[in-house]
């Protein structure tokens, strides 16, 4: 293979995609196992698992959109256009994250019976609702208040955008959607895990004090993704070109 | 948009709903994922129990494993031997269910054997009649997800460029993530702690004090499945069904080649509606349960 300007652009796209995933994870309100017991605010699962679930749903949509472009009769002259692929990825991820949070909210509201409250702020920055009176003793909040929901939607959008931005150059490099998808999932996981360590497993969203630690994740994701991007551009199509 | 495509998307949504519900009930029977922390803890704080205890992995990776196993077998049967699609999916799901049975039994034996010092027994009757129902639910989940992948790759136009196993891996991860975020709350927050005060979160002091008596006799995991199938399972199914249906609906109704902008705008519209619906849920929960009666602070409710 030749190492030219196009290769550097591909690498930059992969790096930006990885950073978007890393930062996006900080927005997703994840409470871990305590949240599943209505002891903590957020979604009751692990950060990486949820970010991967939403980002990869976006990846499926982005892959379909990218393939659909090749079916366009004018494809030979127009080529791929990047924005529809990225935005479709973001939309797919947002739909998955929002359906998850919404159905989770039904259970918090109608089965467990807990008013939604955040223990990290006194007033919800978006709705202005007071929070501490609704937090039961022995818990650090319950449910998914509006600020967490909006934050989760933003995080999913960034994850989906990042996943699609990693996938797009990989397909252009090796021309194999399956190989690119698996490698994109790999890069996605690395960045999501790094960000998850940075927030120590749980976070409520952009209003959480832990969110201020994002520059650390930014740096570590940058280093990891640069290495992965170097490896990624070296992958040649199966059977050679 | 064609009627056939819409029918296929509707079928995918229905299959996804069934897959989500059975995935959640499978994890409830086996106490997988988040509520497993309480089942583990119960014996350690002096509450030995008769509840199945398997935590093979987090729900998303384990479901991704079952669905990919099923999809690989189906893929080989379809591409290599020209088998019918439905038969291939059923054969693949059976293999996944067998794998799950082996791992569930070893997880149950290993976890309970390691808790012998806390007086936690290994119940062979629990293994005998609970493991088959776990396997049955895994069969349903992986069958539905392999069928969704087959529809996306072979039938729905434009055909998806990823091969069946990769799509099944992604949907398996997603259904596990949804089951772990949605259905687990019903099992962990409600079923395991049914005697806590209603209308508030669970006090950390109650950790490990799970309910061990059933409506009749001692509670086992089949009782939990009976309870969670009423609300937690259907909600998980709804979450996964909405994801699969809405995401594919917008690219089927609007042609992704010529009307990509509309497809994206439709997605954004769904997202806004769901944000508003959650706000409504928050309002109704706050109104219904009200502030905590013993609150001592100075912030008005």
Image: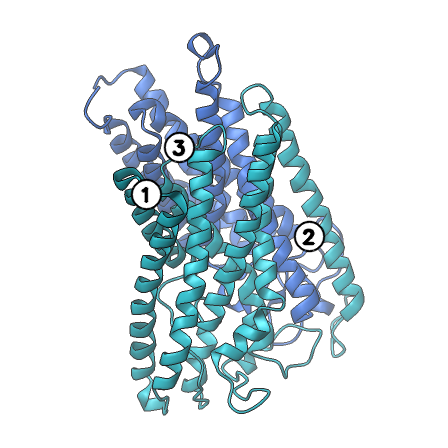
Chain colours: A blue, B cyan
* Quarter of the view holding residue B291: bottom right
Q: Which residue is mark 1?
A: B83
Q: Looking at the figure, which quarter contains the N terminus of chain B?
A: top right
Q: Which residue is mark 2?
A: A146
Whole-percent x, y for residue A194 in the image: 38, 49
Q: Residues within 10 Å of mark 1 (few under 14, many from 20)?
A: some
Q: Are marks 2 and 1 in contact (CB under 8 Å)?
A: no
Instruction: Please report the residue visible at 80 percent of the width from the left and 65 percent of the height from the top.
Output: B287
* Element on which disc 3 rests: helix
Q: Which residue is mark 3?
A: A166
- Are both tags, 2 and 3, on one chain? yes
Q: Do we see residue B117 in this rendering?
A: yes
In the depicted view, which residue is nearer to us: B89 or A31?
Answer: B89
- Are both tags, 2 and 1, on one chain? no
Disc 2 is attached to a residue of which chain?
Answer: A
Instruction: Please report the residue visible at 54 percent of the width from the left and 43 percent of the height from the top.
Output: A156
């Amino acid at each position: 293979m030749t190492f030219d300007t196009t290769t550097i652009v591909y690498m930059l796209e992969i790096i930006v995609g990885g950073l978007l995933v890393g930062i996006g994870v900080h927005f997703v309100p994840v409470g871990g196992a305590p949240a599943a017991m209505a002891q903590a605010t957020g979604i009751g699962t692990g950060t990486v698992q949820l970010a991967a679930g939403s980002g990869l749903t976006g990846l499926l949509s982005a892959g379909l959109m990218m393939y659909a472009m090749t079916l366009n009769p004018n494809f030979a002259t127009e080529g791929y256009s990047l924005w529809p692929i990225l935005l479709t990825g973001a939309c797919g991820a947002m739909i998955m994250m929002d359906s998850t949070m919404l159905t989770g909210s039904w259970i918090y509201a109608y089965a467990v019976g807990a008013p939604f409250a955040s223990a990290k702020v006194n007033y919800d920055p978006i709705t202005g609702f007071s929070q501490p009176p609704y937090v039961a003793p022995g818990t650090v909040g319950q449910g998914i208040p509006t600020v967490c929901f909006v934050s989760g939607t933003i995080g999913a959008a960034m994850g989906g955008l990042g996943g699609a931005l990693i996938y797009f150059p990989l397909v252009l490099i090796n021309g194999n959607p399956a190989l690119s998808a698996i490698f994109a999932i790999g890069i996605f996981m690395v960045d999501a895990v790094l960000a998850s360590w940075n927030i120590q497993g749980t976070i409520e969203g952009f209003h959480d004090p832990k969110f201020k630690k994002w520059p650390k994740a930014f740096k570590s994701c940058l280093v990891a993704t640069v290495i992965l991007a170097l490896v990624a551009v070296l992958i040649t199509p199966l059977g050679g070109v | 948009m064609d009627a056939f495509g819409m029918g296929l998307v509707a079928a995918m949504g229905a299959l996804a709903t069934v897959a989500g519900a059975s995935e959640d009930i499978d994890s409830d029977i086996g106490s997988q994922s988040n509520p497993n922390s309480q089942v583990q803890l119960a014996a350690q704080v002096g509450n030995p129990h008769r509840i199945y205890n398997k935590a093979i992995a987090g729900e998303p990776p384990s479901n991704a494993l079952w669905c990919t196993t099923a999809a690989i077998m189906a893929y080989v049967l379809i591409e290599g031997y020209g088998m019918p699609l439905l038969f291939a999916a059923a054969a693949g799901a059976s293999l996944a269910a067998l794998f799950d049975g082996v791992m569930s039994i070893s997880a149950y034996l290993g976890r309970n054997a390691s808790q012998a010092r806390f007086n936690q027994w290994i119940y062979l009757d629990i293994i005998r009649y609970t493991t088959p129902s776990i396997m049955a639910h895994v069969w349903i989940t992986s069958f539905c997800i392999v069928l969704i992948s087959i529809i996306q790759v072979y039938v729905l136009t434009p055909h998806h460029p990823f091969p069946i196993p990769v799509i099944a891996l992604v949907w398996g991860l997603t259904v596990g993530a949804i089951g772990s975020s949605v259905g687990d709350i019903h099992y962990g927050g409600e079923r395991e702690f049914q005697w806590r005060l209603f209308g508030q979160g669970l006090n950390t002091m109650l950790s490990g004090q799970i309910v061990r008596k059933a409506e009749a006799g001692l509670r086992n995991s089949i009782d939990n499945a009976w309870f969670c199938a009423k609300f937690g399972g259907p909600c998980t199914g709804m979450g996964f069904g909405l994801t699969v249906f809405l995401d594919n609906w917008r690219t089927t109704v609007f042609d992704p080649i010529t009307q990509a902008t509309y497809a994206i705008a439709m997605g954004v519209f769904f997202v806004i509606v769901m944000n508003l619906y959650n706000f409504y849920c928050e309002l109704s929960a706050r109104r219904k349960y009200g502030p905590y009666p013993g609150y001592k602070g100075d912030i008005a409710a």
